Image (cartoon, rainbow, N blue to C red):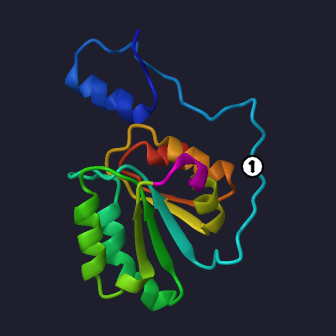
Amino acid sequence: VLITNSEFTRRRASALHDGLERARVCWLGTETDEPAPERTRSHDTGQNVLLLARIDLDSYKGHKELIEIWPTVTDRAPGARLIIAGDGPGLDAVKDLAMRSSVSPQIEVLGYIQEAEIPKLWSQAAVFAMPSRGEGFGLVYIEAMRHGIPVIASRQDAGQEING
């Protein structure tokens, strides 16, 4: 029996290998013995949209797409800020794309964030967005919901399972 973390992953594995009819899904979760953090929004939450994810060169998590759509977002919500946190080999390309955006002052690419600083990012976020095209599960979606933050996810991967 093969156990996968989402129906999306189960379907992908089945497409690659015959004989996985008995594969089963077991979704991940967060620590159950820890109380859910109280939703405390900082004074500067405003219309901040957070993307907290590893940044690979072939990033499928939606960094490029969010940066490219940000001028349209700010046309409709002038105070909206995009905050991108995460590290990886694609970080410089994401920073460059953000700098070249017509609304670059409203896009902040933080890069690597210490674990101790992550709660501050959650408190500053009005929305969490990760329009991934290939997320096998997306534990970060659950973390956002655990913090009481609405989630924008793709319907092309496990995001639709996790977020309903």
**Compared with residue 152, is residue 97 higher up or lower down, i.e. above or below?**
below
**Compared with residue 76, is residue 18 higher up or lower down, i.e. above or below?**
above
In the picture, measured across the screen, residue 96 lies left or right of residue 129, that is left
Residue 150 in view? no
The 10 Å Cα crowd at callout 1, few under 14, some 14 to 19, many 20 or more, is few
Near-viewer residue (111 or 79): 111
Residue type (three-letter) at the residue carrying disc 1: Pro
* Rendering coords of residue 86 (x, y %): 40, 54
Res. 64 image quadrant:
bottom left
**Compared with residue 68, is residue 114 higher up or lower down, i.e. above or below?**
above
* Rendering coords of residue 138 (x, y %): 47, 43
Counting the numbered discs, the total is 1
In the picture, measured across the screen, residue 53 lies left or right of residue 77, that is left
Q: Name the residue rendered at 66%, 63% in the picture.
A: 123
In the picture, measured across the screen, residue 54 lies left or right of residue 118, that is left
Is residue 133 inside the magenta stretch? no
* Rendering coords of residue 43 (x, y %): 71, 77
Of all residues, the one furthest to the top in this rendering is: 1
Residue 72 in view? yes
Res. 46 image quadrant:
bottom right
Label 1 secondary element: loop
Looking at the rendering, the stretch of residues picked out in magenta corresponds to 113-117
Q: Main secondary structure of the magenta part?
A: helix
Near-viewer residue (158 or 61): 61
Residue on which the image places disc 1? 37
Q: Name the residue rendered at 75%, 35% in the picture.
A: 34
Q: Name the residue rendered at 29%, 31% in the picture.
A: 12
* Rendering coords of residue 95 (x, y %): 29, 69
Near-viewer residue (142 or 12): 142
Q: Name the residue rendered at 61%, 59% in the picture.
A: 122
What is the quadrant of the N terminus in the image? top left
